[in-house]
């Protein structure tokens, strides 16, 4: 009886271990923090993953030379340096996205207990609102390599 | 040898089984555990290896690429974006674009790094963004030979209706020239490599020879080998 319970324990441990390695290899969290300002000036922040790390100190949109410029100030709540990435999306007055394929993810560094100002200009004159996504730099990989080869 | 040992063990188990039933059970359980463990591992290992086998996938063209420290797509995209933002928001340039759309031409961007970098691709992205902003117009110097050949055909071949042929000598001359260079500083030791890129872009008035605008974008990329890494 002692051994059959040990056997079950062993099997479950092996299963758990294998299951974990199976899932951790393929899944990566691609969420982060999202901040929006629409054409009417209403703003909202949704932090799914980086809420404990980042705080949105300030965000605003303004027109320069007929083009919409977004400005957002992020604060690092932790003491350690973080490698993150951001991407802007632009919206017109009716709330539809413009320049859908136009904006790449840009890496940036934010030091411990420091603030970082991120500025983005929409080259499209129609833009009058923006959304910014911030996420961990590690969340970018489509392919992941582990001990068993390329995934 | 293994078979012999196994027989020995099992016979010992049998003998001892006569003395106490508990030990016999232990021996069988041990055997079962080993068999079951082997089965579980044998079944799960192929699952582990096949479930995430290498396959072709379409990725996000805009995602951050960190394969190595070479100048990559992320650097191209972020450099172009920052240059365009800087040019479009620089106050004297804002004043220039208030009254009309200035005509620009792009000279080559010199690659002073040790890598092979398609600088024309960087220029294309910048021109693309500037044109879409509606603030500038461009003269494409890479198409001059083709345009000359086409105009020559329309005007001199005698095959095109003269009233419909494109008139020669009516092209608009560029007032400003955009040019720049890309340089890098690479430092490395056995464990670490650090690459610093500097992309400088300038806009010059052709008549006056004055620099109207200039900006630079810096990128630092570093890689550190792990202790057990290859």
Image: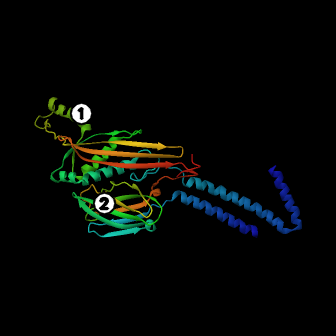
Q: Which sits in the foreground, A16 or B101? A: B101
Compared to residue A13, the image places residue B161 above or below, namely above
**What is the x, y in percent for residue A44?**
35, 69
Chain designation of label 1: B
Residue that label 1 marks = B145
The secondary element bearing badge 1 is classed as helix
**Residue at (58%, 53%) from the top-left corner?**
B49
Q: Position of residue B52 (x, y in %)?
A: 54, 54
Residue at the spot 83% in from the left edge and 58% down from the top edge: B10
Tag 2, which secondary structure?
Answer: strand
Residue of label 2? A90
* Label number found at residue B181: none
The chain that hosts pointer 2 is A
Count neighbours of disc 2 (C-alpha within 10 A) and say few if under 14, some if 14 to 19, many if 20 or more. Answer: many
Q: Is residue B225 above or below residue A120?
A: above
Question: Looking at the picture, how far across and down is residue A103, in whole percent?
Answer: 34, 55
Q: Is residue B82 left or right of residue B101?
A: right
Q: Quadrant of the N terminus of chain A?
A: bottom right
Name the image quarter holding residue A24: bottom right
* Residue A128 in view in this figure: no
Between B23 and B119, which is closer to the camera in this rendering? B119
């Amino acid at each position: 009886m002692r051994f059959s319970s040990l056997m079950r324990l062993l099997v479950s441990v092996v299963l758990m271990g294998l299951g974990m390695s199976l899932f951790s290899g393929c899944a990566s969290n691609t969420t982060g923090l999202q901040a929006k300002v629409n054409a009417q000036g209403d703003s909202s922040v949704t932090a799914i993953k980086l809420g404990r790390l980042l705080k949105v100190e300030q965000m605003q949109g303004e027109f320069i030379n007929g083009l919409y410029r977004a400005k957002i100030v992020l604060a690092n709540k932790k003491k350690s340096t973080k490698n993150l990435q951001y991407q802007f999306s632009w919206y017109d007055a009716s709330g539809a996205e413009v320049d859908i394929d136009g904006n790449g993810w840009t890496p940036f560094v934010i030091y411990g207990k420091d603030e970082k100002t991120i500025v983005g200009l929409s080259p499209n004159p129609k833009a009058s609102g923006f959304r910014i996504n911030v996420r961990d730099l590690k969340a970018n990989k489509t392919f992941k390599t582990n001990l068993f080869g390329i995934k | 040898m293994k078979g012999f040992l196994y027989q020995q063990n099992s016979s010992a188990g049998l003998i001892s089984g006569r003395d106490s039933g508990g030990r016999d059970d232990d021996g069988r359980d041990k055997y079962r555990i080993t068999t079951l463990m082997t089965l579980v591992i044998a079944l799960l290992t192929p699952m582990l290896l096949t479930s995430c086998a290498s396959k072709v996938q379409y990725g996000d063209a805009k995602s951050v690429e960190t394969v190595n420290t070479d100048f990559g797509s992320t650097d191209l995209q972020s450099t172009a974006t920052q240059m365009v933002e800087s040019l479009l928001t620089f106050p004297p340039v804002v004043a220039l674009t208030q009254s009309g759309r200035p005509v620009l031409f792009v000279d080559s961007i010199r690659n002073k790094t040790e890598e092979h970098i398609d600088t024309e691709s960087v220029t294309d992205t910048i021109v693309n963004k500037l044109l879409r902003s509606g603030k500038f117009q461009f003269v494409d110097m890479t198409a001059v030979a083709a345009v000359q050949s086409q105009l020559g055909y329309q005007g001199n071949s005698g095959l095109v209706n003269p009233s419909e042929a494109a008139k020669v000598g009516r092209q608009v001359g560029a007032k400003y020239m955009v040019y720049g260079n890309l340089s890098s500083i690479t430092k490395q030791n056995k464990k670490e490599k650090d690459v610093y890129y500097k992309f400088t872009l300038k806009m010059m008035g052709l008549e006056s020879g004055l620099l109207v605008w200039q900006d630079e974008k810096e990128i630092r990329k570093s890689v550190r080998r792990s202790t057990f890494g290859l």
